[in-house]
Image: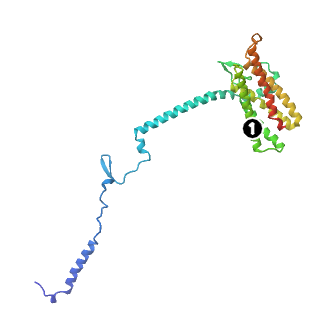
Amino acid sequence: MDVPPQFRNPHQGQGHQRKSQKQNMNKGPTPLFDDTSTMSDPQQQQYMGGQYAYGPPQPGFPGQQYMNDPMANMAVQYGASLAGQGKDVLEKKIDRIMSVSKMKYYFAVDTSYVVRKLGLLLFPYTNTNWTVNYQSDEPVAPRYELNAPDLYIPTMAFVTYLLLAGVALGRQDRFTPELLGMQASSALVWLVIEIIAVLFTLYVMNINSALKSLDLLAFCGYKYVGMILAILGGLFFASGGYYLTLIYCSASLVYFLMRNLKMFILGESDNENFGYGSKRRIYILLFITTLQPIFMYWLTYHLS
């Protein structure tokens, strides 16, 4: 039954209005754009293991596309083979110029050999056997053969010569690192010039001998032993001690080289086969032995 407005409860209309307001508040404001956060982007789908996986694309490492290229793999393999061939060729060239195995032979020494060889350089007049023993067409190692040339003594003597040169320059109040470096460079350059001059003379005179380049380097390097003693004589006994020591060491070295190089240059030739070829060998032998005292004086006179 409808009740007239003037007899209605005043709170009935307000309750209805409150329910309407609550419903409107639950609905919230109308969004301007649709929410697409739960929707998947077709462009971000990845096909993995026979099905699509959603998410950003996984980045690969740099150059992955080139590693998967068969042509790139062939190019890498070809470059590696060329590098290996170049390494082999370079090793052969180096071995032809300076073989490591040959260098080891000249440094195959021990303490007993060094002591006996130094005694032979200073007192060669006491030695009666100058032949070099061979085994399987190869000379015996220096530690087993006193007359075999070595590079250990020349190398150590060269370093000792430079140290004594620095001491001598210091006593003269002329020592500077630059001057010592010039001394080392000068000694090394003169040694190279000496070796080249001897080899060129052997080539021009058409002399075939058993003397190798490293043998010649060893024999020419023995003069540093006498130079060390000459500098020591000058340091302890002034110029008189220098000249006396230099003369004796020069004479001993000349005798040592004459007897030792004779087996390499002249060989086992006897007087019956002595001719023009043997004379040329004698000339080259005298040329090598004469150079040694000259260089010994030239590299030490300013240090006395």
User: Which residue sits furthest top?
Assistant: 272
Which scheme is used to colour this image of the protein? Answer: rainbow
Residue at the disc numbered 1:
184
Which one is in front, 118 or 299?
Answer: 299
- Which quadrant would residue 185 be assigned to in this image? top right
Q: Residue 197 location in percent, x, y?
A: 73, 27
As displayed, is residue 258 above or below residue 158?
above
Query: Is 197 displayed left or right of 252 in the figure?
Result: left
User: Which residue sits furthest bottom?
Assistant: 6
Q: Is residue 292 visible?
A: yes
At label 1, the amino acid type is: Ala
Q: Residue 263 location in percent, x, y?
A: 74, 19
Count of picture labels: 1
User: Which residue sits furthest front?
Assistant: 204
Q: Is residue 150 visible?
A: no
- The quadrant of the rendering that contains the C terminus is top right
Residue located at (46% from left, 37% from top) = 76
Sort mark 1 into few (<14), some (14-19) or many (20+) by Cα contacts within 10 Å: some
User: Which residue sits furthest right?
Assistant: 240
Q: Residue 136 location in percent, x, y?
A: 64, 18
Q: Residue 10 location in percent, x, y?
A: 20, 87
- The quadrant of the rendering that contains the N terminus is bottom left
Query: Is 187 displayed left or right of 96 in the figure?
Result: right
Residue located at (75% from left, 36% from top) = 186
As displayed, is residue 206 above or below residue 186?
above
